[in-house]
Image (cartoon, helix red, strand yellow):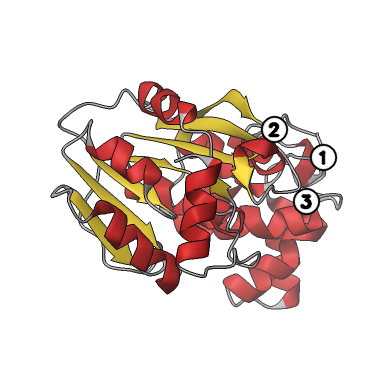
Amino acid sequence: MSLEETKQLLRTYRISPNKLLGQNFMVEPALYEKLCTYASLASSDVVLDAGAGFGFLSCFLAAKCRRVVAVEKDPQVALVLREQVKDMGNVIVVEGNVLKAPLPSFNKAIAIPPYYLSSNLATWLFERKVDCAVMILQQEFANRLVANVGSEDYGWLTVLTCLNAESELLDAVPKDMFYPQPEVDSVIIALKPWSKRPFQVEDERFFKQMVKWLFTQRNKKLGKALAPFLRSTLKLSKQDAEKLADASPFHDRRPRELQPQNFGVIADAITH
């Protein structure tokens, strides 16, 4: 749980933290209680701990909820994780990629995931419709989830987050709370599904594809940016794609200027 314990485990099992796997281990146990409080953790909850590492957070959660699903991709680290939780009957260890491994059902996520996993994990959790997700994410990434329209951080992730969840940045988490230290600071973020979405979309898969594409062309006029996407996605001729793009709502605006709900209007106009 502490820096010393983490270093001891790394030495004992001869593990070198893998930068590619984003292995920065949390060494400030005081944060665990905060995560539980923000998630309103109850004894009936089943919690996903994605990127469980050596299991310090999993052990803490296990004392407060019905079950913990602790997922760890690195086989060496998963070995230690199993050893750490072996006396806890309510921790299920899953070795593998959290996005692909078969998992038992869970209703909340409380995690300190590796940085490389952040965007895929966030969008995957939106699809899972969990009661809430409380995670420690790197500050620069978390800023993209809550960015203002027109800002540099505003992008497809902002739009998808706005459709799916209320998001709130909470406590700052300085980089010295990890070992080895990452290059940037982190923050606790809470994501909770809307009781009523701020806007609706008819075809969520198309909407997501379209928004992702448009933000690769964020400074182009929408009509110009949209045409190649419509041509490839809807298998249209160049002429028909351009015609449909030019007829779309907000065709003379730029993606970076549009409100999240505007993208819903565009997607629905095309797929209707």
Q: Position of residue 218 (x, y in %)?
A: 80, 50
Question: Which label sits on residue 152?
Answer: 1
Q: Position of residue 169 (x, y in %)?
A: 58, 26
Q: Mark 2 packing: few (<14 Cα in 10 Å), some, or many (20+)?
A: some
Q: Left of 200 or right of it: where is 69?
A: left
| Callout in the foreground (2, 3) | 2
Residue drawn at (63%, 52%), measured in percent from left and top?
211
Q: Which residue, given by chain and number where applicable, does mark 3 sit on?
A: 222
Question: Does the CB distance between marks 1 and 2 fall below 8 Å?
Answer: yes
Q: Foreground residue, 17 or 263?
A: 17
The kind of residue on which mark 1 rests is: Glu
Image coordinates for residue 57, horizontal then vertical, percent: 38, 41
For the N terminus, the image quarter is: top left
The reply to whether residue 198 is in sight is: no
Crowdedness near tag 1: few (<14), some (14–19) or many (≥20) residues, C-alpha within 10 Å: few
**Which is nearer the N-term, disc 2 or disc 3?**
2
**Relative to 263, 26 lies left or right:** left
| Residue 79 at least partly seen | yes
Residue 31 in the figure: left or right of residue 87: right
Q: Secondary structure at mark 1?
A: loop
The residue singled out by tag 2 in the image is: 147
- Amino acid at dot 3: Leu
